[in-house]
Amino acid sequence: MNVLVCAACGRRLSEPLRLLPVLPERPGRDGREGPDGTRHAPSTVPRGTCAVDPEPSGAPYVPHPDPEWMGAAVPGTVVLDPDGPGCLMSAGPRDTLVVHPDDARGFLEPDPSSTEIGCCGPPGREGPNELCPGCGARVATLFADCSGPYETHYLPGAVRTVLV
Ligand SMILES: [Zn+2]
Ligand SMILES: [Zn+2]
């Protein structure tokens, strides 16, 4: 099995993970309330696994060149361009590593400077919101609101995979 460690300080940042060949299709939200009272979607990847997201993920957002395009800037959410006729698309990093948020819990610290407020958890739309507790580097984005997917994305340049 592999774990993710901080590229800057070497601190362990995840439970043991097995790499999936492709990112599974995102399950829609089922509206069910979890034991903690939140209603986010089921996790995109099962516990103990990770998958590479080849698509751009998270902030920043830029106008899509096609004003007719009506795709989602964040999975599940279409964002109209406040300054133009079309919609925004993500221009965030590609090849982020997607894990079940429970496999990151306890290994990361929420960024105290993040001002995002979600209904059930951080929406993750403003960029990386989770820090390495060892050195304070921004290493991941938690998407945990009920309006979007339920995923933790590690930045590809901020972590290394090591065998345990
Ligand atoms: Zn909610
Ligand atoms: Zn670190």
Image (cartoon, rainbow, N blue to C red):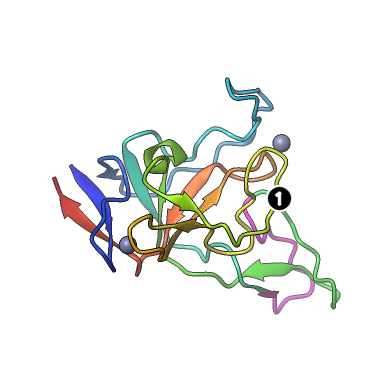
Magenta part, dominant SS: loop
Q: Secondary structure at mark 1?
A: loop
Judge left or right: residue 95 versus residue 83: left
Looking at the picture, tell me which residue is in the foreground, 16 or 18: 16
Which residue is painted at 46% across and 51% down in the image?
Answer: 109
Looking at the picture, tell me which residue is in the foreground, 111 or 72: 111
Q: In this picture, which residue range is highlighted in magenta? A: 62-75
Judge left or right: residue 65 versus residue 127: right
The x, y position of residue 129, in whole percent, is 54, 58
Judge left or right: residue 118 versus residue 10: right
Give the residue at mark 1. 117
Judge left or right: residue 102 versus residue 83: left
Which residue is painted at 50% across and 45% down in the image?
Answer: 151
Q: Name above or below for residue 29 compared with residue 155.
A: above
The x, y position of residue 74, in whole percent, is 64, 56
Which residue is painted at 59% across and 24% down in the image?
Answer: 36
Question: Image quadrant for the N terminus?
Answer: top left
Question: Image quadrant for the C terminus?
Answer: top left
How many numbered discs, if any? 1
Magenta includes 10?
Answer: no
Label 1, ligand 1: CB separation under 8 Å: no
The x, y position of residue 70, in whole percent, is 75, 62
- Please state the quadrant of the image where ligand 2 appears: bottom left
Magenta includes 71?
Answer: yes
Q: Dot 1, crowdedness within 10 Å: few (<14), some or many (≥20)? A: few
Looking at the picture, tell me which residue is in the foreground, 10 or 59: 10
Which residue is painted at 34% across and 70% down in the image?
Answer: 157
The x, y position of residue 89, in whole percent, is 66, 68
Q: Quadrant of residue 40?
A: top right
The kind of residue on which mark 1 rests is Ile
